[in-house]
Image (cartoon, helix red, strand yellow):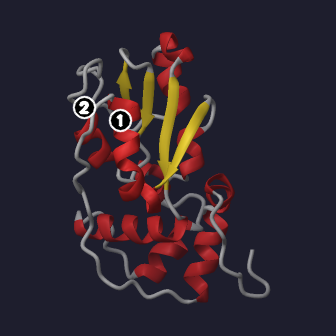
Amino acid sequence: MALINDAHRWVFIHIPKNAGTSIRRALEGVRGCRRDLQESTHETAAQVLERLPQAKGFRFWAVLRNPYSRAESMYRYLRGQGIWEEGDFRDFCDSLTVRRHWLHTLNVTKPQAYFLAGAPVTTTFAYEDLERLWPAMSEDFARMPTELGKANTSPAAPTPWTQFETDCISHVYEDDFALGGYRKLPMAVGST
């Protein structure tokens, strides 16, 4: 669901569970946004360039999220949608470590790095700073202030974390920690 703006020459790469729906809703009415492409599936930066080579000189940007909080959000989202019914958060994290598990077919569980590979994503923002940064971001990308609502949020409920879940997420989303400059929690001795 990349959002492309020809007038301001930018491409927003919508990474699932990183406030992408809220950002799209805030910016989709801005002059220059493509209406024909706004309801496509989640696209990687490379897929956008393959489909639209004229976007090569555009500014690519995305929002990154702490992999631990993103994992909680994707778990709550998939449970709420009735997609994940195979157990609790521990089972979910464990299933993410199994290479051929059906969860890996879903865009929502793919690493954030997957969406940014193969194209020059020049600007990233931290999800955790989004509310504070949004006024300046909307001026930059829309040339006008826009409101950033909250859309597609999963119900907040405490998710139990043990060393097991921490180790699973640290391993599965290892590249995302480096990409966003997030600190991994210590893994248990013997974890991979």
Q: Is residue 17 visible?
A: no
Name the residue beneath numbered marker 2. 28
Q: Nearer the viewer, residue 39 or 91?
A: 39
Q: x%, y% of residue 50?
A: 52, 18
Q: Secondary structure at mark 2?
A: loop
The answer to whether residue 39 is left or right of residue 49 is left
- Identified by mark 2, the residue type is Glu
Name the residue beneath numbered marker 1. 139
**In this rendering, the label closer to the viewer, 1 or 2:** 1
Q: x%, y% of residue 110?
A: 51, 52
The answer to whether 2 is drawn above or below residue 26 in the figure is above
Locate residue 162: give its quadrant: bottom right
Q: x%, y% of residue 128?
A: 45, 63
Q: Secondary structure at mark 1?
A: helix
Locate residue 119: give its quadrant: top right
- Identified by mark 1, the residue type is Glu
The answer to whether residue 105 is left or right of residue 153 is right
The answer to whether 119 is drawn above or below residue 127 in the figure is above
Q: x%, y% of residue 177?
A: 64, 61
- As drawn, the residue found furthest toward the top would be 54
Quadrant of the image containing the N terminus: top left
Q: Earlier in the sequence, mark 1 or mark 2?
A: 2
What residue is drawn where x is 32% and y is 71%?
76
What residue is drawn where x is 65% and y is 52%?
179
